[in-house]
Amino acid sequence: MKNLIIMLLCLSGISLSAQKSQADVKFKLYEYSEAIPLYVKYLEKSPGDYRATKNLAISYKLINDIDDAIAVYRSVVTMKESNTEDRYEFIQLLRVQGNISEARQNALLYQEKNAGEKASNLIKSIDMYDELMIDKDKYEVTNKSVKYAKSVFANIPFQNGFVVTAQGDGIDKSGWTGKGYTKLYSTDINFSQLVPFAKEVMTSYNDGPATLSGDGSTLYFTTINKKSILEQDVNTRKLQISSAILKDGKWIPVEWFKFNNSNYNVAHPALRNDGNMLVFASDKPGGTGGMDLYYCTKQNDNTWSEPMNISALNTSENEIFPTFDNTGNLYFASNGLPGLGGLDVFVTKNEGNTFGAPVNLKSPINSSYDDFSLSTNNDLQSGYVSTNRFATPETDDVAFFSRKVKEVVKPMEHTIIKITVLDKYTSIPLPYVSVSIKDNQNNLIYKGMTDPNGQVMVEELPADHYKVQGLLNDITTTIATISKDEFSAPLIEKTITHNDPRFTLSGITINTLNGPPVSGVTVTCENISLNRTSSIVTGEDGKFFFQMEQSGDFKVLGEKKGWLSSEAIYETTKGLDRSKDLYVKIKLSMQQPTEKDVIRLDKIYYDYDKCDIKARAAEELNRLIRLMNDYPDMIIELSSHTDSRGSNAYNATLSQCRADAAVDYIVGKGISISRIVPKGYGESRLVNECADGVNCSEPKHQENRRTEFNILECPSCPQVVK
């Protein structure tokens, strides 16, 4: 029996190992749909396998099953073998899903372990989400290469159609993608069919993308560096730029580009319309990082000048796929500059040898997937962009975009704009939100603050296009757009939402004696869980607000010179549901002392039959110490009282011991013993009916167990009429 059990265990181990091996084989063959069930079955019995879990997440991602990819990546990022790039991939998937709040939380965790340009641009990208989505309804976007079940991308104008890069249908396949090698093809504007282009200069490996001179007689295209073909590992082979000229209807290879190198990549050529500048991408040493953009200029002898790094555009990540339009604008793709995720397309104005600041083209030209190789010749009224947003992330298509035409409507003479700001999670209107209205040139036109109903009304703005956004607690709201057409109505209503997953502590400082608010109080809020403290000084209304992280413990205290500081209030957000609750509300009671006042310190508690000063009792006594420091001539009697349980003599002795202990603590903090008279009253000064023989509840007895101080003398104290 023992041997049988051992044999079964061995067979079980072999079975598990076989499942993983089969899954790994499918994964390496890019057969992700077949790898997934094998990994799932294996991980049911071996859930801690980091590599298998990560491969499963990648497989889901590459078949465009974003929800399942996110679910698995949630496990990946918690594993001890996980690295920062795993979290980065997780964040990008959350952005694809539209889960911006969770993406930002994870981006902050990513930044903690990977501070730098990449992390800061990632957070900036997430914070810019609403701005980057503002034009999402201004264009129609259609898939022009939908009929092809393979990648078709990077179209450039040629005659009455395009030259595109597309995967071939031959038996030769790329060892990196497992699919046919890419080649150049010509097609019409409807992408009706793909006809091999410049076959005589294509290689046996990947070719494309390409660029053509204005007259169509000179071709530059990306291909494999011939010297690096000898590399056994396809991942170490390098790209180069080859060139050819059209002569007698045939393409003839020429070596017009002298800057290829088998030690690094040189790729993605783009000719300016006048033929005097060539921009390309390279990871040559000395760059900013990843693939950088470089430019060469045509010299008098028709050779290209030494490449110059376009530092104004490059980041630590990749800037690739440059293209020019007919007015000199340079378009390129970047996954380092702030964007929607993956590669985003940017535009920069090229004048001479200078390049302006890059501008993100926003949605829907860009998406949370990879978008690149833009082609337009009418100032983005329409054009083409390559993208992998339509099918699976491994398949690229050419999308056509065109700006929607709107009917012009005559504006009203007087239009009121009503803006409402709501909390995203509870839909509660938010007061004190700073609301700005800007025009299309980003000029500030109006700035105001929401009222207690979370609203602001704006009048007498001229009819134009505007963007509305709010700011509260350093977090921006969504952006609402106002079009010129909307001014044809007497009222424009816009709602923007504030996405802050924290709770709001809403409080007020009041005078204990008569209840009015107290201004000038320094209120501190300590997040005990994170050891983080923030403070604010109250205004005339005595109100204060703090943001409280979820699942945290907090301590709140108010202080003002010459006043007895408030009791420390402890709050927690543990167990609160942010989808139901926004506010945690408290009051801080402040008291300004006068001579002969008797002030009770409620939270000085002692262990049974003990006189020791505990931590919470020390906090209460610290309030008294601060007050006595504010009034150096204050002399007090500090009295301790017990309840009626126990003998009179016992209670008198215990209360005196506790009063002495409190005095010792105060003296230890620098207050002269001559200013304090300790007195233990035992049960002689009960504040309720709970005398000997009376049956009372514990809360009733607690009312009698108290510590008080009586101000015997204080010439400098204010003379307040009660």
Image (cartoon, rainbow, N blue to C red):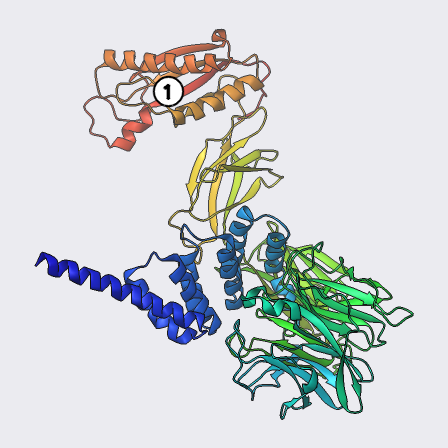
**Crowdedness of circle 1 by 10 Å Cα count: few (<14), some, many (20+)?**
some
Three-letter residue code for mark 1: Ile
Q: Which of 95 and 264 is in front in this view?
A: 264
Residue with the most extreme top position: 674
Q: In this image, 49 relative to 527: left or right?
A: left
Q: Is residue 52 in view from this perspective?
A: yes
- Quarter of the image with the N terminus is bottom left
The residue furthest right is 300
Residue 609 in the image, given as x and y percentages of width and height: 26, 19
In the image shown, does 710 or 548 lie closer to the viewer?
A: 548
Question: In the image, what residue occupies the spot 53% across and 64% down?
Answer: 95
Task: Write the residue at 58% across / 23% down.
Answer: 562
**Residue designated by label 1:** 613
Specify the quadrant of the image occupied by residue 715.
top right
Vertical relation: 326 (above or below) 629? below
Above or below, 710 relative to 354 = above
Residue lying at 60% horizontally and 41% vertically, measured from the top left: 541
